[in-house]
Image (cartoon, rainbow, N blue to C red):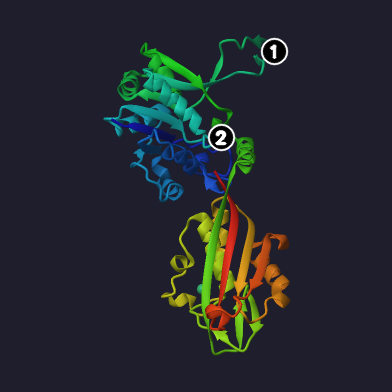
């Protein structure tokens, strides 16, 4: 019997602005729902992840979750409680279900751990909570005792049979809290520590705060690239976006710029997103004689689309001729310009192979590159 995560994403919440429901807005380049779903997909205790979506949002949902291994979504109903019930009905046969708000994308795995541990220990329901630290008062000024008050977060975990029965038993279809429904039918709910990172995004300030938090939680990744082109009759070669006069040209489908090709592949490598041949198939006539700067621009756009940044590029050009040294700084300027980086983020080095091998015999030119990126967690 399996453990299902049910992500409630059917709300119309547009309070955060932009006209798009907040769960589909981008947070540091990545849709909120995609981040939320990934928190569960990468947790080893979760067998299946299902979203509940608004029938009007099918296209937004498909775009936000493209490529992720999710169960078919349930269609949301008029109220949150109705939407949760729709998701539960599609998940029959489950052992445990964790119900989570789509608008809590920064959920740490430790909260999921604690909810699952409480269920494994025999609880029928388990809810993450945080203490109230600020003084509370009523709008007319009277102070409210905060002892015994807790802030309730999600995911809330339940025995599947108990929670679906509690949902079916309720006539109040405006319930916003699943644990409350369980208590109403007389069942105990265990409390486990929540986490400030599991904050719910409600307004614009929450988005800004979450983006600031993400900025300090980036993962560094390094990719490498390598490329070779054979020399052929001609009068110039393209290298790092510059046209260099030479007594030979290169054999290539595109403009044969080994520098830009190796850099492009290094970025694809750091992204874990295929290689240059996959993104720009040589069989496609569109790329005949193509200027290679567009390949590098595309790789840079993929980094940006993931909410990432390029920290550094390092390229080594391997050939006997042409001499790279005189052009090195102009190459750095050109690569930085293509990717909108600064000059000092681009390193270009050159070497010969001491007259050995194909580069030593001046049959071709090679380049190898390393790209260091930071990607959001
Ligand atoms: Mg190439």
Relative horizontal placement of residue 199, taking residue 58 as reference (left or right): right
First in residue order: circle 1 vs circle 2: 1
Q: Nearer the viewer, mark 1 or mark 2?
A: 2
Against 165, is 112 above or below?
A: below
Q: What mark, if any, has residue 141 been given in the picture?
A: 1
The vertical placement of 139 against 224, above or below, is above
Q: Residue 216 in the image: x percent, y percent? A: 63, 41
| Quarter of the view holding residue 197 | top right
- Residue 294 seen in the figure: no
Residue that label 2 marks:
201
The answer to whether the residue bearing label 2 lies less than 8 angstroms from the nearest atom of ligand 1 is no
Residue at 56% x, 55% y: name it.
222
- Answer whether labels 1 and 2 touch (C-beta < 8 Å): no
Q: Give the x, y percent position of residue 306.
A: 54, 51
- Dot 1, crowdedness within 10 Å: few (<14), some or many (≥20)? few
The image quadrant that residue 231 belongs to is bottom right
List x then y, in percent, for residue 12: 48, 37
């Amino acid at each position: 019997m399996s453990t299902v995560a049910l992500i409630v994403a059917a709300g119309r919440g547009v309070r955060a602005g932009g006209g798009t429901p907040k769960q589909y807005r981008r947070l540091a380049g990545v849709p909120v729902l995609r981040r939320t779903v990934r928190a569960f997909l990468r947790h080893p205790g979760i067998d299946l992840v299902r979203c509940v979506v608004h029938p009007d949002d099918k296209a937004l949902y498909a775009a936000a979750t493209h490529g992720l291994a999710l169960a078919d979504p349930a269609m949301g109903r008029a109220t949150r409680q109705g939407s949760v019930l729709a998701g539960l009905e599609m998940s029959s046969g489950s052992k445990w279900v964790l119900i989570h708000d789509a608008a809590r994308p920064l959920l740490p795995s430790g909260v999921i751990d604690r909810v699952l541990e409480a269920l494994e220990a025999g609880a029928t329901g388990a809810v993450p909570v945080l203490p109230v630290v600020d003084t509370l008062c009523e709008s007319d000024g009277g102070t409210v005792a905060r002892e015994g008050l807790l802030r309730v977060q999600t995911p809330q975990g339940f025995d599947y049979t108990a929670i679906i029965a509690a949902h079916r038993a309720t006539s109040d279809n405006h319930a916003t809290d699943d644990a409350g429904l369980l208590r109403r039918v007389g069942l105990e709910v265990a409390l486990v520590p929540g986490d400030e990172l599991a904050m719910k995004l409600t307004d614009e300030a929450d988005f800004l705060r979450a983006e600031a938090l993400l900025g300090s939680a980036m993962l560094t990744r390094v990719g490498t690239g390598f490329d070779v082109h054979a020399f052929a009759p001609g009068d110039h070669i393209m290298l790092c976006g510059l046209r260099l006069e030479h007594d030979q040209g290169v054999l290539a489908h595109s403009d044969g710029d080994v520098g830009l090709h190796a850099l492009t592949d290094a970025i694809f490598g750091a992204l874990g997103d295929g290689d240059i041949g996959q993104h720009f198939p040589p069989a496609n006539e569109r790329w005949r004689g193509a200027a290679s700067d567009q390949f590098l621009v595309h790789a840079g756009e993929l980094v940006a689309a993931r909410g990432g940044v390029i920290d550094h590029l390092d390229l080594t050009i391997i050939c006997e001729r042409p001499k790279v040294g005189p052009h090195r700084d102009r190459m750095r300027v050109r690569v930085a310009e293509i990717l909108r980086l600064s000059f000092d983020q681009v390193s270009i080095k050159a070497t010969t192979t001491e007259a050995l091998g194909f580069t030593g015999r001046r049959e071709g030119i090679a380049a190898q590159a390393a790209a260091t990126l930071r990607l959001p967690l």
